Structure formats: structure tokens, C-alpha cells
Amino acid sequence: MTANTTLPPRPAMPLAGAHQQEAHQQAPPDPAYRQPAAQHLAPPVARPAQDRLPRLLPPDPATSASFRDHLGRFGGLPYRGGPRLLIAQVEAAGLTGRGGAAFPVHRKLTAVASQRRRPVVVGNGAEGEPASNKDKTLLWNSPHLVLDGLQLAAEAVGADRACLYLHRHQGLHARLAAALAERAAAGLDRVRVGLVEAPPRFLAGEESALVSKVSGAAARPRFKQPPVFERGVDGRPTLVQNVETLAHLALIARYGAAWFRGLGTATEPGTMLCSLLQADGRAGVVEVAIGHPVPGVLGLRTDVQAVLCGGYHGSWLPVAEAARLQLSNAALKPAGAFVGAGVLIALPAEKCGLVETARVARYLALESAGQCGPCHNGLPRIAGALGDLAGRPDPGTRASLERWAGLMTGRGACHHPDGTVRFVRSALTVFRDEISAHELGRCTASDHRPFLPLPGDAPIDESGWR
């Protein structure tokens, strides 16, 4: 394994769910890798109890990347012996994608397995969302569980090529390369896995952008005709699955659909990893059962004014409303929100939600690929108007924002304009009182330091897509 440089630990966050235990952290190998403290609950037994957590994260970070420890906990790979044989079990489990879209995994597997040409399988660990750390945490702490899922997905669709796609980070790449070498020496994997480096762009992990990059071109999204399950990497049918989804797949293959459904809800079974940012600035990653109350996951307190659910393509919710909801799409949808990739942020009462939203909107506009009208023209205008609104706006600024946002939905080359508009429109509703204050020339915030995380060195030129 690669050498470890230990960083000072962050304060432990409250754990979500039952079986509360001491929190642990696996420090990254260099200071550039700003991983939050991973939270862990009681470890599974040989065949884990249905009400036991964690499922994905190891109980002891000191052995988290150990191949020997992984085999001791989970055993070898439960290959089925041919394509499609795992798909029925995945369907019975009700597994949905954990990358944000929550698409049924069995339908993706079936669509790719039904193509005539041999498919390619890609594990997507390119976490472009600045507020999300769950995939990096999972890859660092449980690399072999992700790689198990990648192999099982390859068998399920009949793929002869697989790769893992993740953002540039020397320490994490070295850790995964070492894990792959151990597996190759043990003869565990049937399909060779390559590591592909994603550029540091917000949209680099979008499905069509990923396919473009793995095929050797720039990581730009494209209009999805034909879909990637028909023509993806190098023109071949391609299965793209988030790395957390693959880790769940590896557990379902071992323990079955009934075990997986032992946590979560009837319509949204299982657990999920959540990236949290609390009002006091503490950040962390927790594994929780879907359907857990939002206050129990995020630790809402009286010093919170709003909750951002789903990250920067998600929605703001007033704290009183968020406090009544559960972490599931069924519960959040009536409120105009969704689980997404599991980002939950508690905005402190002393911050200006309008100013914070304007900062992020400008970042999102700069991160667009600029290939369609909504991105090239719409997002910059919306970001500029929101910046004006966060200052001292003209009387018609708010109405113009609403009108422009209504013209953009569903017209982009990818979902970036839709997600950005969702984020902005929710802010116009939740922070309406703050907007009125700004229109009168004052801001109610007492602390003007930036709160929502943004990368400090995001590339904004053409070279950033390579």
C-alpha cells in the first residue's frame, strides 16, 4: 500500500441512526486531499443482521484498504457464471443509482446486456459537486468493495472491458492502483480494470462527458442521441454506474435482496452515503438508512435558517419544513426537493442565503460547457442578475430572474441548466424576505464570510476539459 501522511483529525460529528459507536477517520495521503471525517456504525457479522450499519464503510479505518481484511470480511467474489444471472436479484433488491438520478439499476443492466456488441463498464467516481465527498470517502476506505461491484457488473452485462473514472488525485490513484495489483496477483478479477483520470470540472462526471473522456476526447457533455447504453465508449454499449452503486451491488450479490431491503423504505430500500455540512462548519460522511429523518441525519439546531438538499443542483428548504421530512425522494418530492447524491447542508442563521446562492450560481455558470443556448447565454445572465440581487438590485431584477429561469428548463444539452435553475428558483422562494431586505439596501447577515464550499482553483479555460 502507499505511504500514509496523517492529517489532524476533524471533530467527530453526531452519528445518524442506531448502534452509535466512536467515529473514525482514515486520513488521506497528502494535504491536497481534503476528505471529511467518515462516520461509522457497528460492523456487520459474517452474514450481517438486517438492522446493522455500516454496510459500506469499514469499522476500522486502519485496515480499510487492506485486501486481506476485505477478503476476511466478505470472502471472494460471488460470480454467477454468466451474463444476466445477477440482474433478477438486483431487481428484487430494488437498488437504484446513488449518483443522483436514482434510476433502477436492473433496468440499466438489462439495457446494456441486450445490446449486440460487447459492452464496456465504467465505475463513475468523478465527484464534481464541491459539497460532496461520499465517493472519495468510499474509494479511500472501501476500494475493494467498489472493485468487486465493478467485476460483478461486468459479468452481469457480458463486458470485456472495465475502468474506474475519478478526478485527479495522486494519492487516491496510487491507492487504487495498488488495490488492483493485489487483486491481479490473487487472480480475483476476470476483467482487467483501467484507471481513467477525469478533469477537475463540475460536469466531468456527467454520463456523456465521461464516455467522451474515456474514449480519448474532452470530457464535455453531449446531446444524448443515441444513449450511451447503445453507443458509448469507443462506440460500444456502455454501462455507467456510480461507485457507491457498485459497492451496494457487491453486497447484494453476497447477502441477497431480502437483506438489502432490511433497511430503508419499501419503495426506496437500502442505505446511502451522505455528505454533510453542519451549521458550525463541521463536515463529514455518514451512512444512513433511506427514510431516516433529516434532522437526525444533519443534526438541525436553532441556529439554522435553511437546508440545502441535493447539492448545487438541488433545492433550498426552510428549516422548519426540512425538520419534518425524511431522507427519501418520496418524502422530499412534494417539497420540491430530492435526495440526489446525498448532499445535505445546514445554512447558519447568521449567513445570507442570497449571497451564498449567488456565489454558487456564478461558479455553476463558469463551469458550464457552453455548448447550448441555456448554458452559453442563460446561465451567465441568471448568475449576473442573482449577483445584482445580492447587492442592491433594480426593481425588476427579481421578475427577470423568474422569467429567464422559466425559459431554460429542458432545453440544455445536459441537465446542468435544469439543476442550476432548480437551485436558483428555490433560493428565490426560501430567501424572499432577504431579497426584500436587499431591495431596500440592507442585508440581514451578521457574518459575511463564505460558507458554501467552492474549489479555489477551478479552471475556466478550454484546457480544463482535458
Image: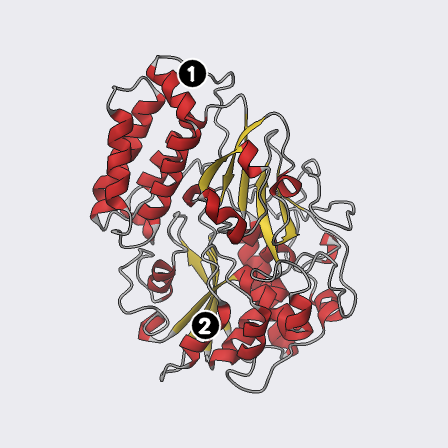
Q: Give how far across and how far down residue 43 sits, in percent.
A: 76, 58
Viewer-closest of 266 and 145: 266
Above or below — where is 436 with respect to 380? above
Q: Which amino acid does label 2 sit on?
A: Arg
Question: As displayed, is residue 227 above or below residue 42?
Answer: below
Q: In which quarter of the image is residue 387?
A: top left
Q: Residues within 10 Å of mark 2 (few under 14, many from 20)?
A: some
Residue 242 visible? The answer is: yes
Q: Residue furthest bottom?
A: 81
Identify the residue at horizontal 53%, vertical 45% (top origin). Answer: 343
- Looking at the picture, how far across and down is residue 264, in whole percent? 63, 58
Q: How many marks?
A: 2
Between 25 and 403, the residue placed more toward the observer is: 403
Tell me the distance, in whole angstroms, between the alpha carbons under discs 1 and 2.
49 Å
Name the spot of residue 58 as percent of width and height, x first: 71, 57
User: Which amino acid type corresponds to the residue marked 1 in the rendered image?
Assistant: Cys
Q: In which quarter of the image is residue 315?
A: top left
Q: In this view, does 43 lie to the left or right of 28?
A: right
Residue occupied by mark 1 = 443
Residue 220: which quarter of the image? bottom left
Instruction: Left or right? Give the position of 384 relative to 154.
Output: left
Labelled disc at residue 282? none
Q: Along the line of sight, which residue is nearer the eye, 54 or 196? A: 54
Per the image, the residue denoted by label 2 is 107
> Mark 1, residues whose alpha carbon is within 10 Å: few (<14), some, or many (≥20)?
many
Q: Is residue 239 above or below residue 434?
A: below
* Residue pictured at 72% horizontal, 74% vertical: 75
Secondary structure type for disc 1: loop
Tell me how the rendering is colored.
Answer: secondary structure
The answer to whether residue 346 of the structure is visible from this angle is no
Give the mark, 1 or 2, whose residue is nearer the N terminus. Answer: 2
In the rendering, at what x and y percent does residue 335 appear? 47, 43
